[in-house]
Image (cartoon, rainbow, N blue to C red):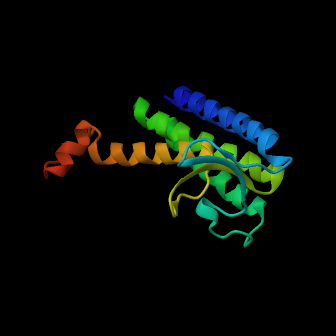
């Protein structure tokens, strides 16, 4: 399972960096906005904080990168112990997304976001492929924890019998 998770993490990180490379080439100089549909626009927004720009400007990008690095190490240990493909894939998505965003922080001091969805006055903050991978990975983890198969030992403990 470890190899599956690492492969997914690698693919996510590479695709994230390739998409950001393209966005920077197309949207940065001169600054441009590309409307794609009535509800989706490509923009270039620099996130100097964490999710949704929380703590923006309150810490060095190296601090955020170090925290993400510690999280990636913990997730890698979890990935090493993963017992099924869903769990390995979910952890791989999260690791790949975290690595993609750390690369941005170390290169630019901020994360490049570019996917911007909006409907009328309502909008979602711009995000990127790494953010999407992290979100999907977390959703899979939550789904698996709520509805995934329990191991045999877990079932006997739940109904009060120790096996």
Nearest the viewer among 88 and 104 is 104
The answer to whether residue 40 is left or right of residue 148 is: right
Quarter assignment of residue 96: top right
The front one of 112 and 106 is 112
Q: Position of residue 89 (x, y in %)?
A: 48, 34
Q: Quadrant of residue 52?
A: bottom right
Residue at x 52%, y 36% (from the top left corner): 80
In the image, is residue 82 above or below residue 135?
Answer: above
Q: Is residue 66 above or below residue 34?
A: below
Q: Residue at x 66, y 58 (%)?
A: 67
Q: Position of residue 66 (x, y in %)?
A: 71, 57
In the image, 30 versus 46, the foreground residue is 30
Q: Where does residue 90 sit, x and y in percent of width and height? A: 47, 39
| Quadrant of the snapshot with the C terminus | top left
Vertical comparison of 73 with 19: above or below: below
- Asked if residue 68 lies left or right of residue 87, the reply is right
- Displayed quadrant of residue 97: top right
Q: Nearer the viewer, residue 52 or 75?
A: 52
Question: Residue, x 72% and y 38% (percent of image)?
Answer: 17
Q: Is residue 1 left or right of residue 54?
A: left
Kindly give the residue lying farthest to the bottom in the view shown. Answer: 58
Report x, y in % for residue 19: 70, 36
Q: How many marks are shown on the rendered structure?
A: 0
């Amino acid at each position: 399972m470890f190899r599956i998770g690492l492969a997914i993490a690698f693919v996510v990180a590479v695709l994230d960096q390739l998409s950001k490379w393209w966005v920077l080439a197309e949207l940065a100089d001169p600054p441009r906005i590309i409307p794609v549909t009535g509800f989706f626009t490509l923009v270039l927004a620099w996130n100097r904080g964490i999710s949704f720009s929380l703590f923006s400007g309150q810490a060095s990008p190296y601090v955020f990168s170090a925290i993400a690095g510690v999280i990636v190490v913990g997730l890698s240990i979890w990935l090493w112990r993963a017992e099924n493909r869903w769990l390995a894939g979910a952890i791989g998505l999260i690791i790949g997304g975290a690595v993609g965003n750390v690369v941005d922080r170390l290169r630019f001091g901020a994360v490049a976001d570019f996917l911007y969805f909006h409907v009328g006055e309502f909008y979602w903050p711009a995000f990127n492929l790494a953010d999407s991978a992290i979100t999907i990975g977390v959703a899979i983890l939550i789904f698996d924890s709520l509805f995934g198969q329990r191991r045999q030992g877990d079932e006997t403990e739940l109904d009060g019998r120790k096996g």
